[in-house]
Amino acid sequence: MGPRRAIGLTLSLTIALACGEDREPPPRPPAHEVPEVPAVEVEPPTTPPEPEPIEPAPPSRVEARGPYQVDLGRDCDGLAALSLDTPEGTCVGLVAHAELPAIAEARGRFRPRSVVTDPQRDDVMWIVDHGARRSRAGRLWRLTRGDDGWDATRIAQRLDRPHGGRVGPDGWIYVGEVQRIRRFDPAADDPAGTMETVVDDLPIALPDRPVRFHPLTSFVFSADGDLIVNMGSGTDRCLEALPADRCVDEARHTGAVWRFARTGPRSWSSEPEYFAHGLRNSVALAAHESGALLQAENGVDFREDSRPHEELNILRRGAHYGWPYCWDRDQRDPEWTHSSFGCEDNPAYTPPHLLLPPHGAPLDMLYYRGAHLGALDGLLLISLHGYRSPGHRVIGLPVGADGLPPADATPTDIIAGWDASDLGPRGSPVGMAQARDGSLWLVEDTNGTVLRMSRDRWAAHRGEARAEPVAAETLEADALFTSLHASVLRPRCAPCHDFIGTEPTGALRAMAREGWLRTEDGRTVLAVRTAADATRRMPPDRPLGAAQRALLERWLSR
């Protein structure tokens, strides 16, 4: 008899007795007999499986490598780990920097702008190095994984201010220089020997200016193989065109995006289509397999930290996105209030899809897919290069099947905590690439590094270990610098660079951390950028006066 039947009989008997049925009670079993009770099988208590043995965390061992204090004891997937904020279970490791022997021996400034995943080999990555701020100082590097890390080999040199790098539809690697786009075969024994020009004669000089304000060539291949190329504006706000009704960049088709139609498996039209206008600087471009084309706009340089926001735009043929007349959707530049181009109720104006952090300076975008870094799967990643507080980080936005983020999406920090400190300089991320193993690679131009984001087996043990202070933290302001700070740096530089507004010693150390005192071709970055004839002069409003320059040069010459 099963347990359910026994319960049913007992219940029936109880009911019958309660109702007074006149029946003989069942015979009582003899005392020595025990009614058979069916056994109920009870599973024994489960014992949790033995946990896998946890490898004890090694002690932190922090040393200076390149510009950073890194942890060599608790590494990041085999690389020296940086102290940065990343999603749980991930970390950022240092792959290469300017002081590596192969890079240092090549001489010249190491300013990587793009990193490209080799289309065939897991152990090779490619670096597009802009070099010093002059013509033909750029280089191409191949990084090859060896037994003791990644080895750098210079493959090509004398590239003219290169920036963009991508794998093309044909499996070759394409590199954008200021006047052209070239390609090479990464599998060749001599990759430099296979270099050939794909697009030539991109404009760099303008009729009234020796160089465009935003001359760097960024590009992306659309879903159908067309070349979509940034053609940055000639100026910041086109104030040089005033009092004209419209900006001269529109007629010159700068401040725009160009399209070179694909004409064959490995060829493109030599004549561009002026695809979209009103875009100040389209360095960050992304193409989705759905056909969507995205552009992250670098907005104008207002001094206020809160405006304008950067923009994420959906590129469409013939659209105008508002530069220099409009910002933050419907706000008008105060210098262009007289223009016939309206920022409200104007069918010719396409407002941004969504707004990004103000002054973030987006320089690259990447659709990440894969389980290696699960927190990144399905995100549109955007590198923010800006020196103001919303910048120097990598952010992520969720996207749908169409490759577009919701218009009300809020960015999530992917790599943050990158302010200048005794652990290293302020971050300056530019190009990104997803490697064949799923790790995320990125490069910094200002700091001269190649970084890799991967899984972190020591995530629960990360500490705040410190090594000896970096050189910048030992600097002290003397009387001459204090005078320079009071009469030149604070009044002329602090409005845009808030770290200059601190007390003199703090400002001096911050300048060193930010790379202002680094030398390029025998001159400091500060001297190059404040020269009266600098391409992007600091301060941007007017040159330093004679007395101010004399004081600066006196201090720099010490």
Image (cartoon, helix red, strand yellow):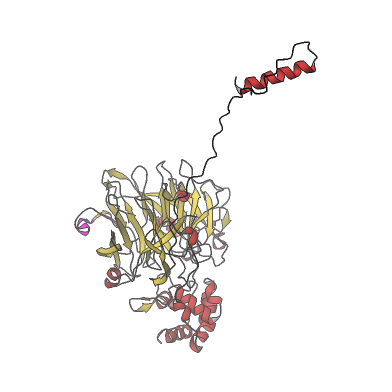
- Asked if one can make out residue 327 in the rendered structure from this viewpoint, the answer is yes
Vertical position of residue 542 compared to residue 428: above or below: below
Residue 194 drawn in magenta: yes
Vertical position of residue 394 compared to residue 62: above or below: above
Residue 553 drawn in magenta: no
Q: Give the residues drawn in magenta, as a range.
A: 182-195
Q: Where is residue 538 in the image (x, y as percent from the top left)?
A: 46, 73
Residue extending furthest toward the bottom:
479
Q: Position of residue 276 (x, y in %)?
A: 43, 50
Vertical position of residue 371 compared to residue 516: above or below: above
- Tell me what residue is drawn at x 71 percent, y 20 percent: 11
Residue closest to the eye, 338 or 234: 234
Residue closest to the eye, 433 or 544: 433
Residue closest to the eye, 355 or 91: 91
Dividing the image into 4 quarters, which one contains the N terminus?
top right
Examine the image and state in which quarter residue 137 appears. Answer: bottom left
Examine the image and state in which quarter residue 30 appears. Answer: top right
Residue closest to the eye, 76 or 335: 76
- Asked if one can make out residue 543 in the rendered structure from this viewpoint, the answer is no
